[in-house]
Image (cartoon, rainbow, N blue to C red):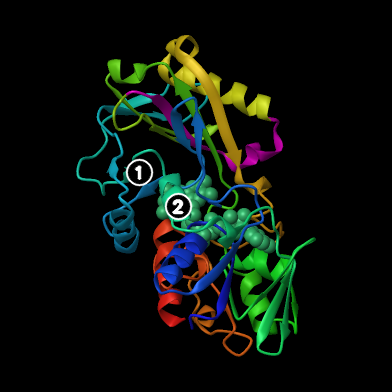
Amino acid sequence: MQDKTIGIIGGGLCGLTLAYKLKLKGVSVKLIEANSRLGGRIFTKDIEGTKVELGATWLWDYNTSLIELAEELGIQFFPQEMKGDALFESMSAHNPQRFQLPPNQQISYRVVNGTSQFIEKLTNQLAAEEIALNTQIRSVKEEGNKLVLNSSDKEFVVDQLISTIPPQLLVNSVEFSPSLPSEIVRLGNTTHTWMQDSIKCAVTFTSAFWKQQGLSGVGFSHVGPFMELYDHSNKANTTFALMGFLNGGLAQESFEKRKEKVLGQLIKFFGDEVKDEFISYEEKVWGQEPLTLFPSNRFLSAHQNNGHSMYQEPLFNGKFIIGGTETASSYAGYMEGAVHRALEIAKEL
Ligand SMILES: Cc1cc2nc3c(=O)[nH]c(=O)nc-3n(C[C@H](O)[C@H](O)[C@H](O)COP(=O)(O)OP(=O)(O)OC[C@H]3O[C@@H](n4cnc5c(N)ncnc54)[C@H](O)[C@@H]3O)c2cc1C
């Protein structure tokens, strides 16, 4: 195995965990990422020291593979702040109602310094020449016992290849020669990509003024633009933010319009301190991310075909495996699924 090279398409959590685990086994790896940054659906943005999650945020006690990886890499987490009352907005004509959150909910944890800690620490385990950024794989060709991969300007020859990009995107954006089996193409086209349509926003402030009002920062709304909102201050309580999910219909609006609507709703929830303490508005419209979503009119239910058993079967005489969180046999779609699948594949190779 040592003299073989394994190619990995995609530098998200699954691809990076796989590269790290294979390196530990002494395998030579080449990780190829289309974007100029690593992380994929993990995207922690740093606004002058205030870190906000515009992609994955939470993990839970049952995420055992992810927690084990965190321990291995020295990554820490802390419970999502939920102390204080929550607010609920049922109609635009009414003020939000205050209510107490029920106790003993499943604790969600946040990662100290953001989920991109996983990306940074895994990347540190790889040598610069093992990673190719800005390289979108467009074709994979079987040539004897090798696979030849091409981007617009580079070629890679590998012994085995693992794709970690969402299966629906894979079957529609990478050309295979010979073609992928038709049942795999059908499966890919009906495999839901988790959070592909979501819009996340974060607003940073000079203080957590909502806490002085006895509020947790948790908000729910049937009106929008944000449908759910959470405190997003850091563990040390030195940086302050609120983070939420916006109504998907707002993807068609401009950035300025979304920002104006979010700030208007926050003023309705928390008062004029929103204006006084405002630092910045950040957002990510995932439905406009061509390296996550393949645009399709087909309706897929959440997690449809995630973890399908056909993904367990290698293709091209064992040379090609379809990975990524959507193919995990447990917790598919989540960070836990991404790590679980990477461990599963690393064991197989
Ligand atoms: C808004 C949002 C909120 C979320 N919240 C949570 C949460 O709270 N908890 C949780 O557990 N999970 C959450 N998730 C899901 C979590 O982010 C994913 O499960 C995980 O990050 C997926 O990792 P992955 O490596 O499988 O895929 P990805 O992160 O999608 O990585 C795939 C990589 O492949 C690259 N790529 C695509 N095409 C090509 C190509 N042709 N050539 C080369 N590279 C290519 C992409 O740029 C990307 O970097 C959330 C996701 C989103 C978007």
| 141 horizontally vs 158: left or right | right
Q: Position of residue 179 (x, y in %)?
A: 74, 82
Instruction: Classify residue 291 by image quadrant.
Output: bottom right
Query: Can you give x and y, in whole percent of width and height, for residue 7 in the image?
Result: 59, 71
Residue at 38% across / 38% down in the picture?
113
Q: Earlier in the sequence, mark 2 or mark 1?
A: 1
- Vertical relation: 136 (above or below) 25: above
Residue 89 visible in the snapshot: no
241 is within the stretch colored magenta: yes
Q: In the displayed structure, would residue 283 be above or below residue 331?
A: above
List the residue tagged with mark 1.
111
Q: CA distance from mark 2 to mark 1?
A: 18 Å
Q: Residue 106: tell me if it is visible.
A: yes
Tag nearer the camera, 2 or 1: 2
* Residue 281 rendering spot, x and y as whole percentages: 55, 25
| Percent of width and height locating residue 50 | 44, 28
Residue 152 vertical position relative to residue 248 in the rendered view, above or below:
below
For badge 2, the amino acid type reads Asn
Magenta residues (range): 238-254
The amino acid type, in three-letter code, at marker 1 is: Val
Point 60% across, 42% down: residue = 248
> Within 8 Å of ligand 1, the CB of disc 1?
no
Mark 2: which secondary structure?
Answer: loop
Front position in the image: 43 or 227: 43
Q: Residues within 10 Å of mark 1 (few under 14, many from 20)?
A: many
In reply to whether residue 108 is colored magenta, the answer given is no
Q: Secondary structure at mark 1?
A: strand
With respect to residue 246, does 141 lie above or below? Answer: below
User: Which residue in the protein does label 2 denote?
Assistant: 124
